[in-house]
Image (spheres, rainbow, N blue to C red):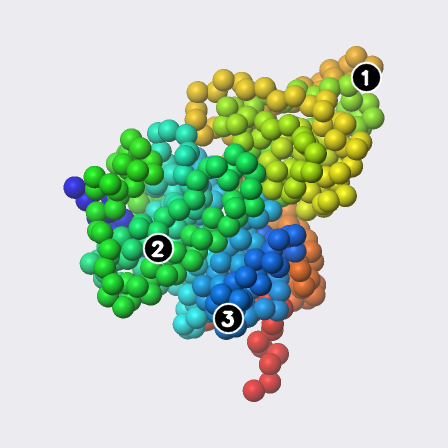
Amino acid sequence: MTLVRDAILDHIESTNFDSLPLDVVAATNVVVADTIACGLAGSAESKAKIFRDIQLSHFGYGGVPVWGTDQLISPIGAGMANGYQVHCLEYACFHEAATVHSMSVILPTVMAHADRFGRVTGKDIITAINIGNDVAALLGLAATQGARFFRPGVCGAMGAGAALAKLAGFDRPTTSEFFGLLYSQLSGTMQAHTEASMALGLQIAFSVRNALTALDMARMYLTGPTDVFDGPYGYFKLFEVDGDATPHLDALGNVWRTAEISFKPFPSGRASHGAIDALQRLMQGHSFGAADVDNVTLSVPPFVHRLGGRQVKDRMDGPYARLCLPYLAASVLIDGTINVASSSLDNLSDPDRLALAAKVSVEDDGNPDVNALAPQKVSVKLSDGRTFEENIACLLGHPDNPMSEAQHRAKFMDSAASAAQPLPVDMADKLYSRLMALQDEADVTIVSNLAAGFDMEKVQV
């Protein structure tokens, strides 16, 4: 039985740029710009340079830019570095219903491919991204149980594979072999999430590597298993036990999942965003600050509680803090928001912040939806006895509660300014403008070079 595989192959084969509605093209541009913004900000993360140096030692210099730096590494090394940078700050966009950060894998993968071979147009990239997001979301939406494997990695890898198959122009038999070669390398579990390990971002990088490696294998006629979705040891027997994609197959080519992607206004786990938003609203509406707070109670769905209900501890690092609801709540009360500096070493060891975090409790609200991120409720009791509550039914950045264009642009410009090698304002502005009209690019290497601080239009030949 190859129902899912054949539906995916049909979708790859039949989809082209003209298949995409104008609003989906526009949404894709925003998704691409947001993902590059995350890669720029992530280039300055504490372990990102170490990881780039490892990739350079393994794969050597090459022609593929690493965003937010002036480094040029070979395609796999640069793709891995960009993948890690996109995901390491918990800032990347994702599909909430599928719980998949597919762009963290797909964009670094397709851009590494484009930078390697050249002459890939903006329309080509937009088409490939939409195919990839559809496949990644299909696998996530098919899940009927809580995640055991790291869905952003494994679903993102298969989505990146679909995108690469389109860019490479593979026929159906070759694409089937390609998926088999990629499936044989799938990796990444939720253990890294449970322990808040930096391996979370590394698992994204591994997925980029695996997709690019499988592509070259398929191009050289190496073969893999072909029934990797429905087979007896396929995806729905091993990775998503009892998962069922069939209710979602008709959406392929009719519902474009890129337009359903949510964005993160804060560099922290998406599970924390309802509580952050609610606290900001309460502080603005009732004019209190950290010194006025007696205690805070966060009531959240089980999925959020499992990911973010961890307590503060000595020697927290950034990955742990960005998924620690008590710490994040305390930071909002002190700073008014969550930003990249919230997980700095100084703040992580701030005794006042840690003491305030101890006053925050996180409760499981019993929501039966295993993937639910909302609703979230925050209750704040002040020292004078007053109590205030705020409910968030839909997280900021979701298509039903969208960020404004100004907020998107501000995130991009702030990220460009905080890169390991900050982009000059005029270059960041030029890059953002080009990304907002990505379909007009004859060769997308110009945008990846701008993201690394190289303006090829100014180079005199």
Horizontal arrangement in the rendering, residue 84 relative to residue 232 (left or right): right
Mark 1 sits on what residue?
383
Q: Quadrant of the C terminus?
A: bottom right
Mark 3 sits on what residue?
60
Mark-to-mark CA distance, 1 and 3:
59 Å
Q: Measuring 52% from the left and 72% from the top, which residue is drawn there?
A: 61
Q: Reply above or below: 165 against 231.
A: below
Mark 2 sits on what residue?
161
Q: Nearer the viewer, residue 14 or 453?
A: 453
Horizontal arrangement in the rendering, residue 417 relative to residue 241 (left or right): right
Residue extending furthest left?
A: 1
Q: Position of residue 309 (x, y in %)?
A: 59, 27
Q: Nearer the viewer, residue 289 or 282?
A: 289
Q: Quadrant of the N terminus?
A: top left
Displayed quadrant of residue 298: top right
Sequence order check, earlier mark of 2 and 1: 2
Q: Position of residue 197 (x, y in %)?
A: 56, 42
Mark-to-mark CA distance, 2 and 1:
55 Å
Q: Reply above or below: 155 against 415.
A: above
Which structural element holds mark 3?
loop
Which structural element holds mark 1?
loop
Q: Amino acid at mark 2?
A: Gly
Q: Reply above or below: 420 against 190.
A: below
Q: Do tag 2 and tag 1 residues touch (Cβ < 8 Å)?
A: no
Q: Position of residue 149 (x, y in %)?
A: 41, 39
Judge depth for marks 3 and 2 and give the one in front: 3
Q: Reply above or below: 201 against 353.
A: below
Please give the label number shown on residue 166: none
Q: Measuring 31% from the left and 50% from the top, which residue is drawn there?
A: 183
